[in-house]
Amino acid sequence: MTNKKISRRTFLLSSTAMVAAGNALARKSSLNRLGYKSPNEKLNIAAIGAGGKGASDIEACSSENIVALCDPDWKNAAETFQKYPKAKQYKDFRQMLDQERGIDAVTISTPDHTHAVAATWAMERGIHVYVQKPLTHLIFEARKLSQAARKYGVATQMGNQGHSNEGARQLCEMIWAGQIGNVREVHAWTNRPIWPQAISAPLPQEPVPDTFDWEVWLGPAASRPYNSGYAPFKWRGWWDFGCGALGDMACHILDPANWALQLKYPTSVECLKQEGKNDYTYPTKCILRYEFPARGSMPSVALYWYDGGERPPRPKGIGEDVKLGDGDNGSLFIGDKGIITTGTYGEGTRLLPDELMKDYKFPEPFLTRSPGHYRDWIRACKGGAPACSNFDYAGPFTEWVILGNLALRYEGKLLWDGEKMKVTNVPEANKWVKRDYRKGWRL
């Protein structure tokens, strides 16, 4: 093994060790707060968001006691309510968290704009949190959640389940073993959005259904009339509620790159192309470029994001008949000595061209394998090792991912000071790093 390979591996292991050490006090605090639950005891889990993705999130935790369910849209949550008839039902998570004093942990599966407020309210009460991706709606919120998790000593996990997959670990081990040399470019793409975007005006008012508490659904966002074009699903395309295609899929597709390349703060981000730019919704398609500085023994890297049907150029020597990623989504890692492609959740990791995989043997595994993304979090809630996508990992990752949405608002390159969360060359852009919250919905 060369010195370069040793230094790369040493850099990774030292980084991982620091994250683990930083969570040691959190585990101890969590155990004290819970009075200790053995792995065989069941947690009392509540759901903030019980319809849609919330239904599958709480189902994945059904080995535990499901004690309360909260959703402002009771029609959308009806099937989940019926499945857990003993769980108390709420429309407002603030009431649930104040009244249900026996909750150990919550899943948070709301629209993006509510993630940070709900998670903060829970963590302040010593409640463990599982938060859907993207972790937050805004950069500032991601930083605040990372800080709050450490302050309150709770177990955390972001819902980018591919981080628990075998393929993501194989990719890391291949790159750290020097399989394709130094990675200098990453290209990642998605078929999203699959909901309306490029809408250039608010939607007209419609009657609010009797089963829907619209004001609670709005939460910290500015007040506006109800329209079914916002909820329960199409909110992702609206600036005030979602994070567009980037927010929906990048925390999955870019996670292997973030992990394997030990990325943190980019030095710049730029929108190279977009269609349908407006003040209300995300564009129908875009191409973004992030630039990351050297990290340890790893050189600087350019990372490209494509959505809305845009695709990266096909690497030289890779025929049109060769499948990249899993087709609709995926990523390419371009190294000095080769190319690797992965699918949506890091699965299907393989060298290109495909002939290289015929007799290929993956490096000897050395990363800890996951019992499953939800089980990993539940184990952490009971005093086990920190979950693999805890907020020390997911917070900085989310910060740089959604930084890309800032670039959609401006022409040219934005220079970024990650430590200070500040655009240094376009001061006006900093107003989008954080926001004001409606009264009663503090962060």
Image (cartoon, grey):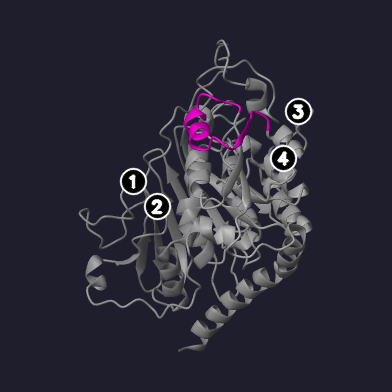
Q: Describe the element under mark 1 as helix, strand or loop.
A: loop
Q: Amino acid at mark 3?
A: Arg
Mark 1 or mark 4, which is nearer the start of the sequence? 4
Q: Is residue 292 visible?
A: no
Q: Left or right: where does residue 267 sit relative to residue 287?
A: right
Question: Magenta part of the protein: which range?
Answer: 72-92
Q: Which quarter shows the C terminus?
A: top right
Q: Which residue is mark 2?
A: 344
User: Label 1: how many residues lie within 10 Å, few (<14), some (14-19) or many (20+)?
Assistant: some
Write the residue at 39% across / 76% down: 179
Q: Which residue is mark 4?
A: 100
Q: CA distance from mark 2 to mark 3?
A: 36 Å
Q: Which residue is mark 3?
A: 438
Whether residue 86 is in magenta: the answer is: yes
Is the residue under label 2 in contact with that under label 1 (CB below 8 Å)? yes
Front-most of 117 and 326? 117
Mark 4 or mark 2, which is nearer the start of the sequence? 4
Q: Which residue is mark 1?
A: 328
Nearer the viewer's eye, disc 4 or disc 3? 4
Locate residue 194: give its quadrant: top left
Q: Which quarter shows the N terminus?
A: bottom left
Q: CA distance from mark 4 to mark 3?
A: 24 Å
- Examine the rendered structure and indicate whether residue 174 appears above or below residue 68: below
